[in-house]
Image (tube, rainbow, N blue to C red):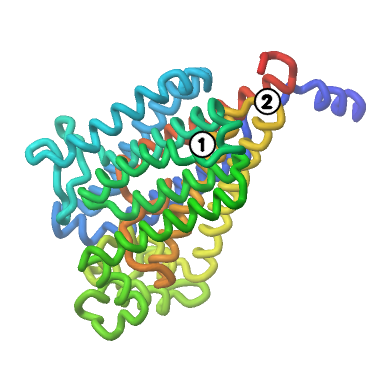
Amino acid sequence: MQNTYSARRTMAPPAPYDRWLIYIVLSLVILGLMMVASAAISTSDQQLHQPFYYFYRQLTFLILGTLLGSIVVQFDVEHWEKISGAMMVIVLLLLALVLIPGIGHAVNGSARWIGFGPMSMQVSELAKFAVVIYMASYLVRRNHEIKTSLSGFLKPMALLAIIAVLLLKEPDFGATVVIMATVLGMMFLAGMQWRHFLLLFILVLLVLSILAISAPYRMARLTTFLNPWTNAFGSGYQLTQSLIAFGRGGWLGVGLGNSVQKLFYLPEAHTDFLFAVIAEELGLVGMLVVIVLFTLLVLRILFIGRQAQRIGRHFAGFIAYGFGLWIAIQFTVSIGVNCGILPTKGLTLPLVSYGGSSMLVNCIVIALLMRIDYENRMVMLGLRDE
């Protein structure tokens, strides 16, 4: 009987997708829905007389994202390489259109959204996705030039400079930093020479530093985060309230739904500062769970990318590397901002914080990663050519 059971296990076909990737994503999404419902309940009730309005919207976007993902996962990865240039052109046009009054929608002084009927899309989220796809294509086409010549990385920098200018006009400094850092990481993993990488890194760091101090509001954020208590009811208000949330959380938190800071003290509690509410309600244990889940997610994505590279699927590998770096950078910056380690910047926790555009794009990202992993497995089983 035991031998029969062992034989059946041996003959069982391998899973078509990375189960651990799915489990981690589901854990983050469920945690995110739970915390969005908790963090936004008071704001939602006061503004819209519906305590779970933001929860229902987030759930709706998750369902829409899942439907989009179910479509994306059906297409071969090579299709994305064919349309990478067209995607980049479309994103550039959208980034320009969002700056036109009447077309772009401004929220809190930033024109980052384009409306489509009752819905709106944050173009910077699409820009992150399109840049990763385009750079993966470029790194495959120009891999030798990237490894040997200075011009290999100066060419995409010209395109990224245009994107950066358009994003800073919105303004969206956070998305600019994420995109630049992701591209630098992708080029480094593609085999760029150390001296070229250091030169480019210093150049980008210098440009971003100049941009950071050139605008008064950015300069205020830089100086405030060093000691937010000097202006606790002015420029340091958001950070001080976030730090109070961390202090109240302790080891195990005050309990789900029992946050005080979300009661109109902490602005953007369900979006940019959701991690502070997690710290207050779930404590250090909850914070560590989130950090571990994101770390495991990034490691699984990078593993998928490495696997694709080893079997000669370089375009798919670079896409996975790009998505892994993007998520790693964004969750690190978001948590760093909430903790007061980094200057205040509007970046959400991927798959966790409230945001329709972010959720839709993140679902597409996960679906494309699942497709890459599926194709990797088919190639290794000999059921598909490279």
Please name whichever residue, 5 or 381, is drawn nearer the observer in this view of the structure.
381
Does 111 sit left or right of 186 as displayed?
A: left
Label 1 to label 2: alpha-carbon separation:
21 Å
Q: Is residue 217 above or below residue 304?
A: below
Task: Please state the horizontal and vertical placement of residue 365, each as a whole percent of the image.
Answer: 46, 35
Question: Residue 18 location, x and y as percent?
Answer: 63, 34
Residue under pointer 1:
152
Left or right relative to 343: residue 383? right
Which of 189/378 is in front? 189
Q: In terms of image quadrants, where is residue 237?
A: bottom left
Residue at the image position 12 percent from the left and 39 percent from the top? 100
Camera-nearest label, 1 or 2: 1
Question: Which residue bears the numbered disc 2?
Answer: 312
Q: Quadrant of residue 300?
A: top right
The amino acid type, in three-letter code, at marker 1 is: Gly
Residue 166 visible in rendering: yes
